[in-house]
Amino acid sequence: MKKLILIGLLLILVASLFAQKQTGRVTYFFNRDAKISLGNNMPTEQQKALTEMLKKQFQKTFVLEFSDSKSIYYQKKELQENTKSNINIMIFDGTAGKLYKSTSEKEYLKTDESLGKRFLISDKLLKPNWQLIDSTKKVLNYMCYKAKYIKEETEENDSLIKTTIEVWYAPDIPTNTGPDKLWGLPGLILEVHEGKVSIRATKVEINADNIAIEKPKKGKKISQDEFDEIHKKHMKKVKEMYEGGRQKDDGNTIRIKISG
């Protein structure tokens, strides 16, 4: 235990000395391991093809650009594969838009247009209560250390959900940021595991060219709680529309159930 505490203190000291001088660009692979169930009113081959299309909706590429205590995290646009299917699938999971973080000012700004309007979500950047773990492994040839914390969220029925988030961070890259809203460790976070979600760095560019971190400015500025309330009402309307239309099912409707 004493060894772990000394290592943690040393890493924090190193990060505080050098984090302000580090810039870089990191590419991450995002995957959500969702279970997909389709209705039985389609041929087996079509079911397989549609299942693969759905799985790809949960696999995305993200980019994190950081400079000093600021960073931008966004989804990388990729070319759509040619397909004979005329089915267009869109899944809103909260990962769209650009996320700006400032660990020195402890704030974040996120753009969102998923509800048909342009929002600019602005709120405090809370530091996770990290627990350092005496465990190491290599990610992209960087020696990484393990850390975890318990994330608490309130469901619509006011029940409290606790999720363990485990990460691997690299002290050799002395910046205290990471993907999404994660930050606060003495090294860049290269890998994340949160329930069915995994995020893993596939490329790291230190002192990369053309990195200019700017605050997003466009959109109606609201807090995270305000946006969550708007989103909840929107999803309720979508659910009501779906349930209403389901009563008029003519036998050609494809029913999809996604969990996880």
Image: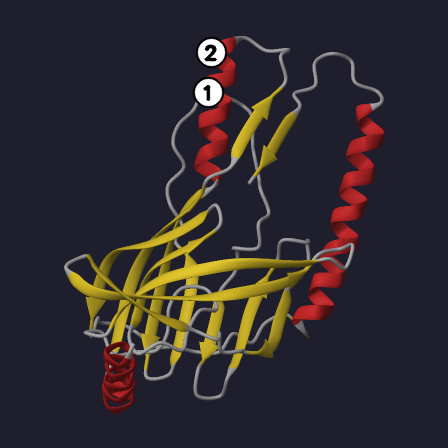
User: In the displayed structure, does residue 11 sit left or right of residue 34?
Assistant: left
Q: Please tell me which residue is depicted at 81% across the width and 36% down the height of the picture.
A: 241
Query: How many numbered callouts?
Result: 2
Tell me where residue 245 appears, x and y as whole percent.
Answer: 81, 27
Could you classify mark 1 by the number of other residues whose Cα lies within 10 Å: few (under 14), some (14-19), or many (20 or more)?
Answer: few
Whether residue 231 is situated above or below residue 32 in the rendered picture: below
Q: Please tell me which residue is depicted at 35% across the width and 60% down the height of the picture.
A: 63
Name the residue type under label 1.
Answer: Ala
Give the SS element for disc 1: helix
Q: Mark 1 and 2 residues: CB-CB less than 8 Å, in contact?
A: yes
Name the residue type under label 2.
Answer: Glu
Front-lying residue, 179 or 99: 179
Front-lying residue, 225 or 130: 130
Tell me where residue 219 appears, x and y as whole percent.
Answer: 63, 70
Quadrant in the rendering for residue 172: bottom left
Q: Mark 1 points at which residue?
A: 49
Front-lying residue, 18 or 128: 128
Q: Name the residue under label 2.
A: 45
Quadrant in the rendering for residue 174: bottom left
User: In the displayed structure, does residue 34 sit left or right of residue 222?
Assistant: left
Tell me where residue 169 appears, x and y as whole percent.
Answer: 29, 67
